[in-house]
Image (spheres, rainbow, N blue to C red):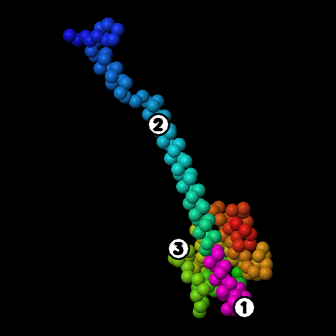
């Protein structure tokens, strides 16, 4: 009663047939590990693609902000005869902010996300999409006779290839 016939006509215990069915239905540890590794590879690809897209978007936003500041600086020059003075330091964007948004005439409105308060100078510093200050110099060295306006870019260091500048085609 405890035996069942298989296809070859031989008899096998019923318990053996049940165990085989359970073994065939379960996943082995190797199979589970392979699936986990595949999922981890896919997650790595998605995360790196998202990081690239985020950096590219921040770069585009910084270029757009710089173009708007360039237009505002040109309007300032038309009204005042010269660009505001800037010394290319990390706080040089304070003079840009004061000239374009802090004076009697507003040439550009900065969003709160574009400003960071400098407690030493008690003024706002204009920051790029990477959270670093813009740099400004007038008279310009690289963009003579105009002004130099640049962002340190994704790495936050000036004078590196990833800088976003107004004196060369990006």
In the image, 153: left or right of 37?
A: right
Most foreground residue, 20 or 163: 20
Please name which of the two marks, 2 or 3, marks the residue nearer to the observer: 2
Q: Residues within 10 Å of mark 1 (few under 14, many from 20)?
A: few
State which tag comes first along the sequence, 2 or 3: 2
Indicate left or right for 53 with 22 as reference. Answer: right
Give the percent coordinates (x, y) of residue 72. Answer: 64, 83
Depicted 147 relative to depicted 48: above or below = below
Q: In this view of the protein, which residue sits in the foreground, 69 or 118?
A: 69
Q: Find the distance from the CA under tag 2 to the CA under tag 3.
A: 42 Å
Please provide the residue range marked out in magenta.
66-84
Residue 27's image quarter? top left
Circle 2 residues within 10 Å: few <14, some 14–19, many ≥20: few
In the displayed structure, would residue 45 be above or below residue 97? above
Residue holding disc 3: 113
Q: Distance between the residues labelled 1 and 3?
A: 30 Å
Q: Compared with residue 104, is residue 19 higher up or lower down, i.e. above or below? A: above
| Residue 78 horizontal/vertical position (percent) | 69, 89
Q: Residue 81 carries which label?
A: 1
* Disc with the residue nearer the chain's start (1 vs 2): 2
Residue found at x 60% / y 61%:
56
Principal secondary structure, stretch drawn in magenta: helix
Mark 1 or mark 3, which is nearer to you? Answer: 1
Crowd class of label 3 (few under 14; some 14 to 19; many from 20; radius 10 Å): few
Whether pointer 1 and pointer 2 mark residues with C-beta atoms closer than 8 Å, the reply is no
The reply to whether callout 1 and callout 3 are in contact (CB within 8 Å) is: no
Residue identifier under label 2: 35
Name the quadrant of the N terminus. top left
């Amino acid at each position: 009663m405890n035996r069942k016939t298989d296809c070859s006509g031989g008899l096998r215990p019923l318990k053996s047939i049940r165990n085989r069915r359970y073994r065939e239905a379960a996943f082995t540890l190797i199979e589970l590990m392979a699936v986990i590794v595949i999922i981890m590879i896919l997650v790595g690809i998605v995360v790196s693609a998202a990081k690239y897209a985020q950096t590219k978007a921040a770069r585009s936003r910084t270029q757009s902000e710089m173009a708007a500041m360039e237009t505002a600086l040109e309007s300032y020059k038309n009204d005042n005869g010269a660009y505001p003075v800037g010394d290319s330091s990390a706080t040089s964007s304070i003079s840009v902010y004061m000239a374009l948004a802090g004076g009697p005439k507003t040439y550009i409105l900065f969003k709160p996300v574009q400003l960071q308060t400098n407690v030493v100078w008690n003024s706002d510093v204009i920051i790029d999409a990477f959270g670093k200050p813009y740099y400004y110099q007038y008279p310009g060295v690289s963009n003579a006779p105009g002004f130099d306006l640049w962002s340190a870019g994704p790495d936050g260091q000036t004078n590196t290839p990833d800088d976003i500048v107004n004196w060369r085609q990006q």
